[in-house]
Image: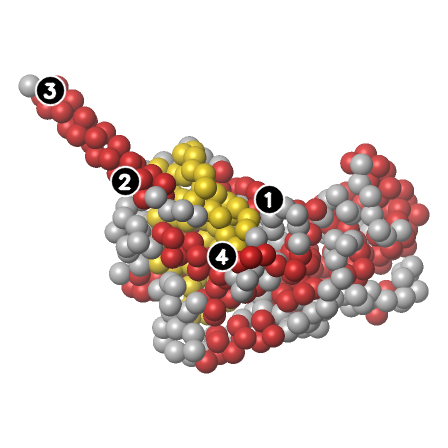
Amino acid sequence: MKLRSFVFLLLCLLSFYSANAQELLAFMKAQPQVKKIEEITGNPFFKHTYVVMVREPLNYKDTTDGFFLQRVFVGEKGKQNPTVLITEGYAANYAESPKYINELSEVLDGNQICVEHRYFAKSKPEPLNWDYLTVENAANDHHSIVELFKPYFSGKWLNTGISKGGQTALAHRTFFPNDVDLTVAYVAPLNFGVEDGRHEPFIHKLGSDSCQQAIYQLQCEFLKRREAMKGFLKDYCDSKGYHTRMTYDEMVDYVTFEFPFAFWQWGYPCSEIPDLSVSDSALYSYFTKISEPDYFTDEGSVPYQSFFYQAVRELGYYGYDIKPFKGLMSIKSAKGYLAKYMLPAECKVTYHPETSLMVDKFLRTKARNVMLIYGGSDPWSATSAVVNDDPSNWKIVAPGGSHKTRIRTLPEETQNKAIKFIRDKME
């Protein structure tokens, strides 16, 4: 009798999950903008995980300009559960992993919808007309996804993103403040220029004086060994089949300038900085492990070209302080390097600050239920967003934290408060 009861219970559960899956599938199949649905193996946390291709306008102001298919990953936990909308700023290939789960989905026992950003990976229009890659169009993409799935997932919603994805979440909230109940943006910069100007002095104040000196001396050493470093860089690019619009002399310079930003961004320890007497190969190996030369090549930077376009057009970026290296460089100025070397060759674009200023104004005046999380030693924190002091908002800066700062990396007391803050907002 016990065995029969167990089998009966198991069949009931299987029937329930099957009906649950059919309900979501039926809902998605009934939506005219959903063009493809595939169930994939997702994290066991979710009952079902799907990859969905959604038809979106290239230009929301004039839909006669055409459409593209946007890749969306849907992890289902329950119709009434909260929903975590991940406004990815780049490609969302990671969401294909059977292990992937956002930390907020676990915190909230929530559904998870990860939206790949337009013009990245599987969400690229054909032909690739750069005119439609705007922050406003991307915000409309996310608004469209909210409108698509809210009739099914009826619980509260939050949007979230990391780095450029955090920028994307803040912009989505600015253009559509009522789409979600809470925004959690991680390490999200808010720049006001292609070379904003706040990052360089911020970097010079990070860490101890001895660490700053060690980094500077290592940069000088890399430049002093220019001929050897040029040879290594050429061999590397040849082995990878990479091309660059730079000369190898220029690449030596830019790999040097990039080093401190990358060092602090990813939280490398000062104790591992090598002695200046190391061999040429050891110096090159350590230096380029942190300041990767791929970044300055055409092929190596392909995954980021859409971002470079956005940075030059609306999002802004950072510059380099080259004054300390006078006499050791091959270049006279680094100004305009992003457009000169890293923008897709066919793109001619000028910077417009209006979008960043609009987001800044919204956060400083009207924003409610916004959580910002930054690492104290992350160079992107130099241009961190500022949110008004309404008690529904909270900005956390983790002392010594890097660009890897997340809720799970915060000190335990702050972590617990952050989780409570989010759960209270999403009840």
Secondary structure state at the residue bearing disc 3: helix
Q: Image point 39% across, 78% down: which residue?
A: 390
Q: Measured from the top left, where is residue 169 in percent x and y?
A: 49, 61
Crowding at dot 2, Cα within 10 Å, few <14 / some 14-19 / many 20+, comes out as: few
Query: Which mark is first along the chain, 4 or 1?
Result: 1
Query: Which mark is first along the chain, 4 or 3?
Result: 3
The amino acid type, in three-letter code, at marker 2 is: Glu
Secondary structure state at the residue bearing disc 4: helix
Tag 1–tag 4 contact (CB < 8 Å): no
For the residues carrying marks 3 and 1, which lies nearer the camera in this image? 1
Query: Which mark is first along the chain, 1 or 3?
Result: 3
Q: Quadrant of residue 144?
A: bottom left
Query: Which mark is first along the chain, 2 or 1?
Result: 2
Residue labelled with disc 3:
4
Q: Quadrant of residue 351?
A: bottom right
Query: Which mark is first along the chain, 3 or 2?
Result: 3
Mark 2 and mark 4: Cα distance apart in space: 24 Å
Residue labelled with disc 1:
121
Mark 3 and mark 4: Cα distance apart in space: 50 Å
Q: Which residue occupies the extreme left position in the image?
A: 1
Instruction: Give above or below for 291 relative to 15.
Output: below
Tag 2–tag 4 contact (CB < 8 Å): no
